[in-house]
Each structure stands twice: as C-alpha cells, then as structure tokens.
Image (tube, rainbow, N blue to C red):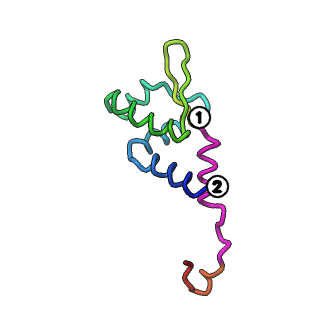
Amino acid sequence: MELETAALLLSKIGNPTRLKIVRLLVRAGDQGMPVGLVQKKLQIPGSTLTHHIAHLKSAGLIRQEREKATLICKMEYERLDDLVAYLTEECCVDDSAETGSKVA
C-alpha cells in the first residue's frame, strides 16, 4: 500500500461516526448489517448516516448489497487488513530504539 492510500483511508476512518460504523461492521462479520440497524444502533439521522457511508464506500472500506428490500453494509476486510498491515509492516525492524537514537 502506498503512503497516500493509507493516509486517505485513515482520513476516512478518522471521523468518530465513521469509526463507529467500521467497528459495528467488523463486529457484524461477513453477513454485514442492514443500514436501518446501523442507524438504530448509532441513533443518527438517515441523511447523516448516508453521508458517512458515502465516505467509507469511496475509500473502498465498505460495500453495500441489496437483499430484496434491505440494503446491507459489509466491511471490505481485505482493504482494512491491507491498511493494518501497512501500519505494522516495519514493526520492530529499527534497532535505534535500543540505543536511544532518534529516527528521522
């Protein structure tokens, strides 16, 4: 993952409401969660939820699927996993922490 992509994803998740949505959908698992239930759990207006979902969708973090009359939000786990991997890929490779020197 490129730095710019990671920064974009973090900016999209970096809103408290959007972070709540992501966490709800992660807990929901692969089956996702109906938009109406997300709205009920967060207790926010539908228009506000639509706004935040649009941000998450534009970053490829979630997708929506229609099941008859119900719109289901589903987490894009691969995209989220890629972000986490990017953030942790160089974990513990800099031994300068042992010597107390600063990393630029």
> What residue is shown at x 52% (from left), y 29% (from top)?
73
Q: Which mark is residue 85?
A: 2
Label 1, on which residue? 29
The residue at the far left in this view is 45
Badge 2 element? helix
Report if residue 88 lies within the magenta region: yes
Q: Is residue 97 left or right of residue 50?
A: right
Range of magenta residues: 76-94
Contact flag, marks 1 and 2 (Cβ < 8 Å):
no
Residue type at mark 2: give it: Ala
Q: Position of residue 82 (x, y in %)?
A: 63, 49
Residue type at mark 1: give it: Gly
Q: Position of residue 89 (x, y in %)?
A: 66, 61
Relative to 47, does residue 27 appear above or below in the rendering? Answer: below
Relative to 88, does residue 70 appear above or below in the rendering? Answer: above
Q: Position of residue 90 (x, y in %)?
A: 65, 66
Q: Nearer the viewer, residue 30 or 49?
A: 49
Badge 1 element? helix
> What residue is shown at x 57% (from left), y 58% (from top)?
3
- Chief secondary structure of the magenta span? helix
Q: Nearer the viewer, residue 18 or 38?
A: 18
Q: Is residue 82 left or right of residue 22?
A: right
Q: Quadrant of the C terminus?
A: bottom right
Looking at marks 1 and 2 on the same chain, the residue that comes earlier in the sequence is marked by 1
| Residue 86 image-quadrant placement | bottom right
Query: Badge 2 local density, few (<14 within 10 Å), some, or many (20+)?
Result: few
